Amino acid sequence: MKFLLDFLFRVVQLFTEPYFLVFLAVVIIALLKRKNKGKNLRIGVGFFAVLMIVFIGNGFLGKLISGYLQKNYVSPVASKNRVSQNPVIVVLGGGVVDFEHTEKLHTLSYSRLVTAYQLYYEYRKNNLPCKIVISGKGRGYTSEAELFRENFKKMGVSDADIIKEDKSMNTYENAKYASKILKQLAPSDVYLVTSGFHMKRSVALFHTFGLKPVPQASDFIDTEITVFPNSYNAAFTFVMLKEVFGIWQVQLYNSLGLNG
């Protein structure tokens, strides 16, 4: 059941990809022409594909989605305004880039690194304990968790305060494996650090595993409304649309009891 639903969601997500829409339109038009179907129908298919590409690429749809995904996380809850004696910061990996046989954290990861460190520093400067759980294996030779750990140590974070979770390959597994660690630590507060567009789905998944993290968005993305569609708007709209489908997927799976 879950495998089938996973497949269906992946197929649906393809329809948010402009290049796939162009490919699909060309194939349909070619098939209709081969079967001598009506010219008006072929024009209609082409017009619909172009309309979808414009709608995705001119920034309007992206602007709407960015608000839906991120507006609740613009003003983070500062640690100094909360009474926490044993807080834990959970940082979700943002990917690893292997360039010229050198593995580095993805650009997204560095904003998460800085945000987590700022939270950690607020506690440590007041001599309060604080742990950082780094969640993510990634697809490289070196895990995301290990690369984060190396960077945190260079920034002055004590190795004793760093806990690696280096098994998870996606957000669902981030929440699943990190929740096991957190239940052992029994923290007073859990701060969840990830990108703004990724936060709503991440929080929903952590709720699935019985946790109520304090969201700390590390970065935000948005689109610019333009007359003509462009690749910048299309790329970020596609990223955000995938998140929306991911949120719906979490909600559906929770209602069917397929998560957990």
Image: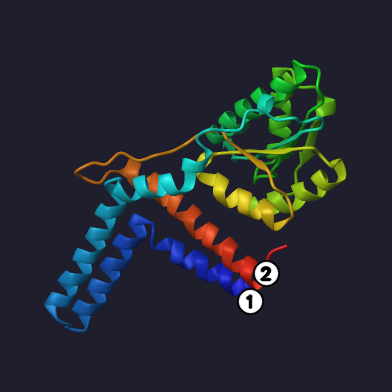
Label 2 environment density (alpha carbons within 10 Å; few <14, some 14–19, many ≥20)? few
Question: Residue beneath label 2, please?
Answer: 258
In screen coordinates, is 107 left or right of 152? left
Q: Distance between the residues labelled 1 and 2?
A: 9 Å
Query: What's under tag 1, amino acid-wise?
Result: Met
Question: Residue beneath label 1, please?
Answer: 1
Residue 13 position, x and y percent, is 45, 61
Is 188 in front, or is 97?
A: 188
Query: What's under tag 2, amino acid-wise?
Result: Leu
Q: In this view, does 91 lie above or below 209?
A: above
Please identify the quadrant where the N terminus is shown: bottom right
Name which residue lies at 35% across and 45% down.
63
Is 34 in front, or is 212?
A: 212
Q: Which residue appears farthest toward the left when viewing the image?
A: 39
Label 1 environment density (alpha carbons within 10 Å; few <14, some 14–19, many ≥20)? few
Q: In this view, does 31 lie above or below 207?
A: below
Confirm or deny contact between disc 1 and disc 2 (CB under 8 A). yes
Name which residue lies at 65% across and 23% down.
118
- Mark 1 vs mark 2, foreground winner is 2
Q: Is mark 2 on a helix, strand or loop?
A: loop
